[in-house]
Image (cartoon, helix red, strand yellow):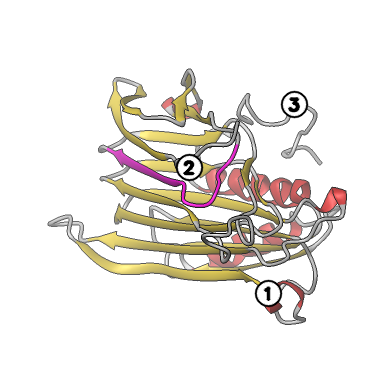
Amino acid sequence: MQRLEPWHGHCQLTFQRSGDHTRHQGGCSAPFKMLRAEKGENGRCELPLLHTAGGLVGGDQLSIELTLEPNSRGLVTSVAAQKIYGSVGRSQLEPRGRWACQHVRCHLDKQSDLEWLPQELVVFADGLYEQHFMVQLHADASFLGTEIVRLGRTASGESLQQGQWRSNLSIQRCNKNNGRPEDWELVDRIELGGDAVNDLHGLNGKPVFGSLVWAAPMNLEESRISNLLSDVRSDREGLSGTMSCSALHQGLVARYVGTSSRDARFWFSRIWARTRALRKLQAPRIPRVWPLQEAPLQR
C-alpha cells in the first residue's frame, strides 16, 4: 500500500570515549533503526543504520545529528543501498515532483575521529534528492566521508530522465582555543541532472558519481601530501572509470565518474586504508553489513 504522508525521521547520536573504546548514546525515530554496534579497530564504535521504509519518496525528510566527544572514534554506515523513487510526473497535484531531503550535522570535538561510509544511493528515473551535510570539527579531529550515487537503474536500461541529485557539503574547522567555527576546509556544491549528466564537461553519460573527502587531524607537509596523492593515484590500478584526487588545506578530496559503483567503492576503500596508515592506526575491517562477495581492500 502506498504511503500517503511523507516520513520525517530523526537520528541523534553521541559518541563517548569509555576506557579503551567508544560507546554511543542516543536514539532514532522511524524510519531509522540502529542495529547492534560493534567494537572496531583502535577502540572505534562501528554503527550500522537501517532505513526501514525501503526507500525515499518525494517529500520525505531525514535528519541525522552526530556528536563526537573528545578522543572518541566512530564509524557510521548503512545496511543497504538507499533508493530514491521517482517523483516528477507522478502526481497531478504536483507534476513537477517533490524533493526527498536528508540533513546531516556532525560536531567533532578534540582528537575525535568520524568515518561516514554509507552504501550506494540509487536515484530512480524522475527521482529528486537533496542532501545537506555540515561538519564542524576541532583542529586535531579527523573526518572521512564518502558518497557513491547511481543515477538511474542502469542494469534495466533506465536513465535519470527528469530526476536530479543535489549535494551541499561544508566542512569548517573550529578554533582550538575557544571551539568556535573559524576556517572553512571545504564548501562543495554539486547538482547532477539534465545536461550535466550527458555533457562532456559533466558526467559524459556515465551513471555513477562518487566523492571522498578527508579532513585530516594534522597539517600535512608538502612532501607527505604529495606522497599520499601519488599512492592514491596508484590505487586506481585495475579499476574502471575516471578517478581524480587533489589536496585540501589539510586533507584530500577524491572523485569518481564511471559505470561501476563497485570500482568506486574499491578505490575509496583503498584511500580509507591509506588515511588510517598515515595516522599509524590499524588497517580498516570491512563492515559486516557490506556485500559479502566483495573484498575491496584486496588487490
- Does residue 254 lie above or below 153 as drawn? below
Q: Mark 2, mark 1: which one is toward the viewer?
A: 1
> Residue 213 appears at what percent x and percent y?
52, 58
Is 214 colored magenta in this rendering?
no
Q: Which residues are magenta?
A: 55-68
Give the residue at x 39% y 63%: 170
Give the residue at x 51% y 50%: 145
**Image quadrant of residue 250?**
bottom left
> Residue 144 appears at what percent x and percent y?
49, 49
Q: Along the line of sight, which residue is nearer the eye, 19 or 125?
A: 125
Mark 1 element type: loop
Q: Residues within 10 Å of mark 1 (few under 14, many from 20)?
A: few
Residue holding disc 3: 292
Q: Amino acid at mark 3?
A: Leu
- Does residue 16 lie above or below 151 as drawn? above
Residue holding disc 1: 194
